[in-house]
Every structure is written in structure tokens, then in C-alpha cells.
Image (cartoon, grey):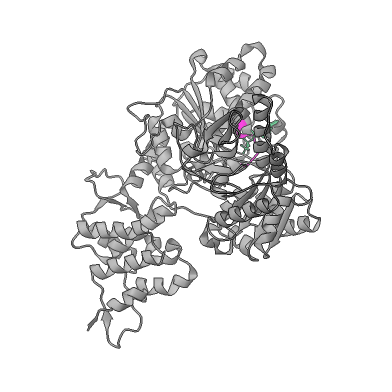
Amino acid sequence: MKGRRKADLQTLDLFAAADEGDTVVLSTTDWLAALERLADAGLLRRLDSALAAFVAEQDAEATPALLVATAVLAQMEGRGHSCLPLSALASHPNEILAWPKEALRLQLSLWEQLPRQTSEWLQALRRSPVVRVVPPGVAVADRGQPLVLWDGPAPLLYLRRYWDYERSVAAHIAQRTAAGAVALDEPRVRDWLGRLFSASAEAAEAVDWQQLACALALRGRMSVITGGPGTGKTYTAARLLALLFATAPDAAQLRVALAAPTGKAAARLKQSIDSSLRELQGAVGRDLDLEALVQRMGAARTLHALLGARPDTRRLAHHAGHPLDVDVLIVDEASMIHLEMMAALLQALPPTARLILLGDKDQLASVEAGAVLGDLCRDAQQGHYAPDTVAYAERVTGQSLPASYWATGPALPLAQHTVMLRASRRFSGPIGQLALAVNAGDAPGAMALLRTQTQAGPQAELWAREGGEVETVVRSAVQGRGGRASYAAYAERLAQRGQGGFATEAEHQQWVRDVLAAFDRYRLLCAVREGAWGVAGLNRAVEQALQSQGAIRKEGEWYRGRPVMVTRNDAQLGVFNGDIGMALPGFADPARLRVYFLQGEHLHHVSTARLAHVETAFAMTVHKSQGSEFEHTALVLAAQGGNVLSRELVYTGITRARQAFSLWSEAPGLLASAIASPTRRSSGLLRWLNASAHS
Ligand SMILES: Nc1ncnc2c1ncn2[C@@H]1O[C@H](COP(=O)(O)OP(=O)(O)OP(=O)(O)O)[C@@H](O)[C@H]1O
């Protein structure tokens, strides 16, 4: 007997209460309707069910397994995964779907109707004309199928775009890290490393990782330098530049470019590299003109600007056919580079240019699909250095790497160009200890540290409150705790020149800089956007609090002192996604508000009327805060954070704090459960890198 339960589709209770003896068989149309209902319920995105419908249009024989795999794959892409591991879909669908607990019964009833074995899912996919099936080691022509199935052990399903990006990234990295890519004058390298690192504090440790990073970077066309905040990534990159400058045969012509995913991070990189190079001048004397290098480098740019992103098109000005005009490219905050961007960057880079990626592998990955730096640094802690690398390192740095960092089997070429810096110079106190505990997944340790510090009083470096009212969070944001930074300083600066009346433009500019600097000392960072404990609610609440104390007068969207974050790149206006600015009266026409942005040392301003894509920025997401640091950071965890609350989110929030960190959690237990939830994004990148290394 066959039963059809159209009415149940409305309630999503698809297979409940079947009449005795009924066998429920749903047609393709029923399944598509079910996927749409799942989108109605917010368990899938519209895009996900629409892609399944598109597949059904293309394949008249589409099976439920194909439709479900398609929708789930699309949904996973929306959560940052680049592919769908099919065996997990068969055996642990609840982990793959990441639906809330309440949807477990629904998920179970759906999976009742779907294949149990990976092999059955594979069969459903292999037969479909919408799937390009790629067995291991076989090149299969692309006939424009929307899905790609890598049909080897532990099979993976891809959306075509992400398959292309991942394969392209892997191929470029393999090429750039191939052995013998660069010829070196080793005695010269040794001599210069000795000069550049002679007074290095890192030398006191068992291994001078910074020196090793420079040595290994010289050997290939790509290197990865990872490490937590303050471990000296930019310090090392500056020395690497000096080393390249000192050892390259064509040093005078070397074209160096600096970039980062956000404008703020780019400005910080430039500042930090410039000051490191200038400090180094003393050590290198007249042999190298580092000031000339500083001048030649020019400003650091966002990756979008570097690649020539254009509004309203995915196409970039620079690509393989029109490569970037650089010999050395240093990219900071590489954890924020998503797969599509990394593919575009590698394609646009001339094969002979060197790419140096700097970043913290433990930070949140970008919202978009891919966690490239995390993937590339999966083994960075262990080193996995091949005998040849160990011998080279000893020859040029004079240090022997302990055996615990040697590769035990065949070594990945990329590992020979990857170094993890381990000693933080900025974070030796409680903030650093908390970050380490979170990173190690040690929730009891992190909680104990927060408790002890909180008990020490509001002036302590760390402070935490679990449970309580959101009003307390807002009060702390506008009044501060124990003399630590808050928005009080910004409100004060704003009030200082209530009447305007600046005698000179320089005086006005100084005031604008002061307000921006005061605002930048403190930030509320949220896990989610919506709700009272999210970005939207807190922005409103802080505005109200400041309004009631007379610091701002909100009479519409724009008001004097409104801090904003740009949400879309606009090259014409010279503002980029993530830039923070503030609406303040202009000098020439104080009755008009202009939005001021500090870009490095340069003060840039734009009329409020022209800035369409901005949002208020008293509170921002942890994601958007990457690449920035604040004297005092307050991390706000909302109870409805669900699977957004991850270890990486908490770690990223904590490491945005320079001098003080506060944690506000809507309910007890949120921090511990976030620490216990590390994010793992599905990707095949390491697999492709391994395959090309051993083929
Ligand atoms: N070997 C060293 N000897 C002395 N000072 C160092 C050394 N390495 C780093 N520093 C100093 O430590 C501080 C942090 O270094 P740096 O800014 O390079 O770290 P980072 O890893 O790039 O940090 P972030 O994650 O914030 O970008 C800087 O003031 C730098 O000059």
C-alpha cells in the first residue's frame, strides 16, 4: 500500500502517523515541496531548495538522494564548507546539517526515507547527468554539470565552482612549493640571517622560529608564517623583506606589494612593516637602503583593490592573462581569505613572484566558503620538516631542529615552507593565558582564570559575567569598569567641541582624530546580528544610553558622532568593507555632517549622502572585527547563538583585546560550550596537495 501525505508536508511532519501497513513513498515533487518547507522553516536557505529544483529540472530521473544531497551541499556552502563528505551524510546527517536540536526528530524521519549506505548515495549521484564523476587520478572533461563528485575513497561532492577553486588553489600551491624552485647563495643567506637576527630575543628559545621562517621562505615561491597575536609575524616579514633585498640579484628592481583582506588590516600591516624596516636600518648599516624600500613599496591595499575588483561583477582586472605587477607580495590576516579569493589571488600572481602569507590559523575563517589558512596550517604545530629542510635550516641558521619537528613519513612540500611562531611578545598576561586555554579547548581552565580575575575587581585585565540583564552590558559600554576604556572617552571628546567653532582646519582635524582614536579604544563584539544581545539590539541600546546622557542627539539616520562600518567596497569613494568611520561636522560647513575615516595617517572624508552601505558600529560581529584590535574588548554571547558560538569565535574575540577583556554571556554555560565546539570546515584541499606531492 502506498500512502501520500500532502497535508503533512505543510507541517513538515512528513512521515508521522502513517496508517498501519502503509509504506510511504514520496515522489520527486513531494521531495521538492519538502525541501521548500525546510527553507520556510529556516533549516535550509531558499537558494538551497532552488538548486535542488534546478537539478530536478535538468534530470527527469532525479532521485530523492540526489535532490537532498544537492540541497544539503548548497546549505553547507552557505556555512563555509567547500564540499560535502558523502559518508558523513549517510552516517551522521545531524552533524552535517547542523540543525537545532528541536529538528532532530524531523531529520530522523527524513533520513528514514533516504539511503543508509554511502554506496547507495554514490549510485544515485553517479547515474545523474548533472554530476561530473571524477575517479581518482583521472581527468574528466567539464561538460558544465553543476555538481562534481570526487569518486574515490572518502568521496566528496562539490558545487562546480568550489571544485574548480579548490583544485586551482592546490595546483598553484604545489607548483610554488615544489623543491628546487629557487636557487640560493647559502653562505650569503647565512651571513645575512646572522646580522638580521643577532639580537633576537627569540634566540633564547630552543628554536628561533622567526629566523627559520625567513630561511624557509627564501627557498620557495610561497611561504606561510602563522602565529597568535604578537608572535612577530610582521616583525619576521620585515626581516624577510630585508633578506630578499640583500640577497636578490636584482634587488634594485624588486617590486614589493603589501595587502590584506580589509583596509584596516592593510593600513596596520604597512605601518608595522615600515617601522620594523626603519628600526632595522641600524642593524644593517649602509649595506642596505631600507628607507628606499619603504618608499618603493607604496601603500598597502585591500586584496579587492589589489586584484582590481569592480562593482557588480565577479571579474577582476588581474588574472592569469593580466597578472599583477609584483615580485614579492606579503598578505596579512590570511585567515580571512576565502577559497574564491585565494584562487583569484594565486591565479593573478606571476609564477615567478613570491607570496608570503601571514595569519593566525586559529582565528575565525571568513564567512564565505573555505578555511584556506587553517587547512594549509593543519600540521604547522608539528612542523613535519623533511631531512632536506632540516639540513638546510642547519646550514643557514646554524640551529638544529629537534627531532619532534621532523617528518615521520613522506613530507608535504608545503610544510617545508610553513612556520608557526610560538612566543607572543604582547600577550604574556591573563589575556594571553585565556586565549591559550580557549585554543587548547580547556574550558575549566578558561573559566577558572576568568573567575579569579573577576573576583579581583573591575579593574582587572579580565572580567566575566554569565547571565544577567543586557542593560548591565550597555551601562558598562558607556561608563566603563574599573577605569578601563569604554565609550565614555569618545562621548567626552565629542562633547569637548559641542559648538564647533574651530579656528583652523588643523585644529578641526586634530579633534576628528581624537574622537576617532577615543572611539577605537573600546568595542562591543557580538556573536550574532539579531536580538537584544546581538549587533542590532546593542547598537540601539547604546545609542539610547548615549542619547539619554546627552552625548548624542539622534534625530534620524545620521547624527553627530554616529560611528559607522562600511559594508560594501566602493573604490570610487575610497572606502572598503569593514572600514570604520564617524559622522562629524565638517570644517568648512559645520552644519553638514561628513563621515571621517582614518586610513593609516591619512584622514579621509565622504559626505553622508554618498555612503549608502553602512551600519552603526558601537557593536559589531566578531567576524567583522578581525584585523582590528582595541584597548578593551567586550565579547557578548547571545543564548540564541546556536552553532555560531565556536571556539574560534571566542578566541578571535579575546585576541582583539590589547589591555582588557570583558565577557558578557546571556546565559551560564555558553562560553564553555563554545570552547568545546571547534569548527571543522569540510574541504579537500589537503587531500589534493597530498595527492600532487605523491604523484
Ligand atoms: N624577535 C623579536 N625581538 C624583539 N621584539 C620582537 C621580536 N619579535 C616581535 N617583536 C616585537 O613584538 C611586537 C609584536 O610583533 P608583531 O607586530 O610583528 O606581531 P604579529 O604577530 O604581527 O602581531 P599581530 O597578530 O597583532 O599582527 C612588536 O612590537 C615587535 O617589534
Measured as percent of width and height from the top left, residue 512 is found at 65, 33
Q: Quadrant of residue 107?
A: bottom left
Q: Residue 633, percent across and down?
A: 66, 48
In percent of width and height, residue 86 lies at: 36, 59
Residue stretch rendered in magenta on the structure:
228-234
Q: Is any atom of residue 644 visible in this view?
A: yes
User: In the picture provided, is 28 more to the left or to the right than 337?
Assistant: left
Nearer-the-camera pick, 417 or 409: 417
Image quadrant occupied by the N terminus: bottom left
Asked if the stretch drawn in magenta spans residue 229, the answer is yes
Give whichever of 213, 236 is nearer the camera: 236
Q: Is residue 615 left or right of residue 316?
A: right
**Number of numbered markers:** 0
Q: Is residue 170 left or right of residue 359?
A: left
Question: Of all residues shown, which one is farthest toward the left?
Answer: 60
Task: Say which of 520 and 369 sits in front.
Answer: 520
When the figure is inspected, residue 475 is found, relative to residue 469, above or below; the finding is above
Asked whether residue 418 appears in the rendered view, the answer is: no
Residue 4 painted magenta = no
Which image quadrant for residue 129? Answer: bottom left
Image quadrant containing the C terminus: top left
Dividing the image into four quarters, tell me where ligand 1 lies: top right
Query: Residue at horizontal 69%, vertical 18%?
Result: 283
The secondary structure that most of the magenta stretch takes on is loop
Q: Is residue 683 above or below residue 383?
A: below
Residue drawn at x 24%, y 65% is 63
**Residue at the top extreme of this rendering:** 286
